[in-house]
Amino acid sequence: MNTPGATLSTSSSPTDPAAAGAAAIEVRGVAKRYGARDAVVALDGVDLTVRQGEFVCLVGPSGCGKSTLLRMMAGLHRPSEGEVLVHHEGTRRTPTAMVFQDYGIFPWKSVRANVRFGLDVAGVSRSEATRTVDSWLARLGLADFADAYPATLSGGMRQRVSIARALAVEPEVLLLDEPFAALDAQLRTVLQEELLALWQSDRRTVVFVTHSLEEAILLGDRVVVMSARPGRILADLPVPLERPRSAETRAEPAFAALEQQLWTLLRDEVSRTFAGGSAS
Amino acid sequence: MSATVVVRPTAAEIDPVRTARRRRRLERVLAVLTPLLVLVVWEIAARAGAIPVRFFPAPTMIVSTAGDMIRSGVLLDDLGATLRRVVVGFLAGSAAGAAAGLALGLSGLARAAFDPFLSALYTVPKLALLPLLLLIFGLGETPLVLLVALSVFFPTWITCMAGVTAIPEGYREAARAFGASRWDMFRHVLWPAFLPQLFVALRLSVGVAILVIVGAEFVQGNSGVGFRIWHSWSLFQARPMYVGICVIALLGLLCTTVVTALGRRLLPWAQPADRR
């Protein structure tokens, strides 16, 4: 997975892993170029630090490279330049787990087998895996659908399966790539609340990519705004809202103020993408 | 003067279950009724002398000929010979085709090395190879079985390879995100994603196998359903020909049904929702 000496590396000895605020992920001077003669610059000069236990939301116009950046954290892509460091305790095969927007869960596996996948791959013993899977199925309200196949489930249920599969491996860092983008607005609200409740009960490090400002503010400790291609970090704003949050948090004045502030930042970027017609 | 449009429930809304059931029953009756009607018209026309019985014997005559052929043991011997060739050739050809399709689908280098070569061979009509096979292997079972295997190999290979290369990258990415090894990737992602495609290939090639064996038996051998049809022609006997044609059609239906049922049994997740 993570070959030592490669541009993307993981370090298993942060200076003080227990201390609050220690860095979990460091992105240093990352650039990503694609195509013939590197014609497409997806990311350029990105620096970002995610601290342990922090919930960071990445927002930006389509094609700004936010998903690419997230995939680098998962070890799925490599940067053309710079490095991504994922600090972890080194007890698991992968320190990260990822929730995808689609194609995430396997249609040939039952709900139970899907949730179990990460544990099977990690070589967790049968009895321990069964226990862990059962508890996550119960926590996400999937127990009654344990033997169903994904094709019979609604979109919302499928994303619950995807989230359960990621959390079942107890990752040090949870990465989510627009997990609710394909759901209708009401269902999205329900799942946002569920995710909020889950995270508030065990605060692991989360990086959440979304194009919904509202979602980013509701969930995140910080909102990182990226520019249109080439993706750069435009702003990195803390969310001044108390936790625990819930659906009612949306009604607070600070919520609307921050959303307005973010939208002002993004509006020019979005119209730039729109004019360029190069959305991906 | 004024009018009112009235929208009220009809029988279909009041009792949808019963309406649907009645509709299904009607469809089933029609499915049986149409061929039955054709047979009855044929029978009457043949008996009335409207069509020449020498070419178009009445269905009852064909059935009685079939009875004679079963009693004398000819029909079962022929069926056994054909079935043996089809089954052995089909199993060997589809196993090799599936393995080749999987290997070429998974490895770009294997594809580069073998794809142009196999694609060139694919366009050769396999029946054209029969004389060559007869020349090499002599008169016997080997050339017939080999011909079936060859004609099954190519469609299986092509369909399987296309299936593997079409597995969405998203599934592999999801597996890699959990640190899946190459073996995990194969076991949990590639193999199960490949299986439905394999069954599509098998359904296609089982038909090809039967087509080819009949053609081969026309030319070569002294047993088999194809041989029986051809032999009856040389004796100017229409009735055993019809029996042979019906038997080969039923054999095709049986083989396809077996493959489909097996696929449904083994891959419950890949079935259309209404079949589950």
Image (cartoon, coloured by chain):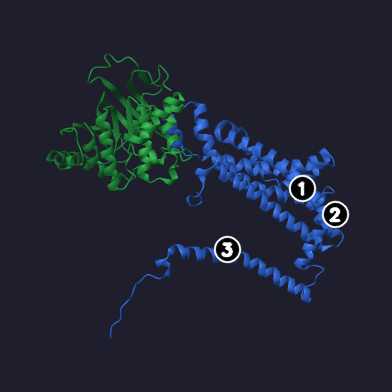
Chain colours: A green, B blue
Q: Position of residue A106 (x, y in %)?
A: 45, 38
| Earlier-in-chain disc, 3 versus 1 | 3
* Residue pictured at 66% horizontal, 42% vertical: B154
Q: Are marks 3 and 1 on the same chain?
A: yes
Q: Nearer the viewer, residue A57 or A198?
A: A198
Q: CA distance from mark 3 to mark 1?
A: 32 Å
Q: Is residue B128 left or right of residue A22?
A: right
Q: Amino acid at mark 3?
A: Arg
Chain under numbered label 3: B
Mark 1 lies on residue: B82
Question: Furthest-right residue in view?
Answer: B235
Judging from the image, what secondary structure is the residue with disc 1 in?
helix
Q: Position of residue B273 (x, y in %)?
A: 47, 50
Mark 2 lies on residue: B72
* Residue pictured at 34% horizontal, 72% vertical: B7
Q: Nearer the viewer, residue A87 or A127?
A: A127
* Residue pictured at 35% horizontal, 30% vertical: A167
